[in-house]
Image (cartoon, rainbow, N blue to C red):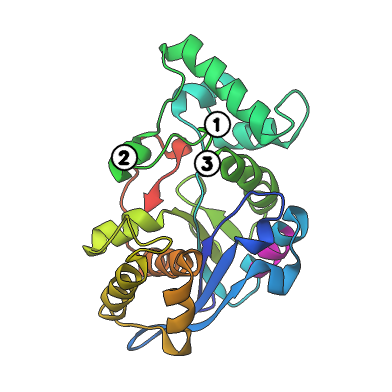
Amino acid sequence: MGSGVLGVDFSGARRAGDALWVTVARETSTGLVVEDCYRATAKWGRDRESAHAGLVDRITDEDVATAGLDFPFSLPQRLLEDVGDGEWRGFLEWVAGGDGPTDSASFSTACRDRAEGLTGSRDVRRETDLQRAALCPYTNRVRSMTYHGARNVLGRLAPREDTAVVPMQADDAETVVCEVYPAATFGWLGCYREGYKGDDGARDRRAKNIETIAACSVDVGEHRETYLGNHDALDSLAAAVSAARVCDGSRPEPMGPAAEGHIYV
């Protein structure tokens, strides 16, 4: 197993490469050292398919011990029972084709219609979403990330013996893949989980978040200006911090059924 850690601020947009950022770090005896930070477009291309394929290839490099990805890995258990026989792999098969949704909009509609019939509510969150103040995984704001993340990334990683998507799969593989949520990570660290994106004082808040992370034995090196200037890049740093904690063994039991997934901070 390598010592590399990847933190990924994900995008499911058509031109996903422009908004998908990756922080590459390494665990050392003195803490986490950032080695690189880049936009997916610079490495793998702008369109969604090439950006996601490039990401999968990078995750499965032999030097990667842990990868933290910022998108919902699953659905609430009640919906999993309806679309995947209660199993996470059934959910992946559902979004991969056949009788399942064909795009993120139809995915969201199908989930909402099923949720309303099962629970009386259209937007249902997982237990981990409630714990971390995250959104419903198929709501409009995140539906493209959940759908394309499951279809293009997790669906390609799940069958591999050298990767394990936790907590759904046994974590004895060479590379562990975990769900993260930068806002929750910043909140756990006691800095800004909101208000650090955009302008109007946001740069100062990003600076505070960077300082707080650096104080946790994280060396951002020459990439400080990148994180200061772009909130998506900064989110990938937070993702790397949480992924490194999973690599160190900080893996609490999921709040709900393992098939729902768990947001690690």
Which one is in front, 253 or 127? 127
How far apart are the alpha carbons under marks 2 and 3?
21 Å
For the residues labelled 3 and 1, the Cα–Cα distance comes to 21 Å
Q: Position of residue 5 (x, y in %)?
A: 49, 73
Question: What amino acid is at disc 1?
Answer: Glu
Q: Mark 3 falls on what kind of element? A: loop
Q: Nearer the viewer, residue 262 or 123?
A: 123
- Give the position of the C terminus as an image quadrant: bottom left
Q: Which mark is residue 87?
A: 1
Question: In terms of sequence position, does the residue under pointer 2 or pointer 3 come before the other?
Answer: 3
Q: Name the front one of labels 3 and 1.
A: 3
Horizontal side of 171 relative to 215 (left or right) equals right
Q: Distance between the Cα atoms at labels 1 and 2?
A: 17 Å
Q: Nearer the viewer, mark 1 or mark 2?
A: 2
Q: Can you tell which of label 2 and label 3 is closer to the viewer?
A: 3
Q: Which residues are magenta?
A: 53-58
Under tag 1, what secondary structure?
A: loop
> Is 259 drawn above or below residue 249 in the view shown?
above
Q: Is residue 12 magenta?
A: no
- Viewer-closest of 62 and 242: 242
What residue is rendered at 44% in x and 69% in y? 234
**Any part of residue 265 in sight:** no
Residue 161 shows which numbered tag? Answer: none
The mark that comes first in sequence, 3 or 1, is 1
Disc number for residue 142: 3
- Characterize the local packing of mark 1: few (<14), some (14-19) or many (20 or more) Cα atoms within 10 angstroms: some
Q: Is residue 110 left or right of residue 29?
A: right
Q: Quadrant of residue 193?
A: bottom left
In primary-sequence order, the first of circles 1 and 2 is 1
User: Amino acid type of disc 3?
Assistant: Val
Query: Is the Cβ of the residue at disc 2 closer than 8 Å to that at disc 3?
Result: no
Amino acid bearing label 2? Met
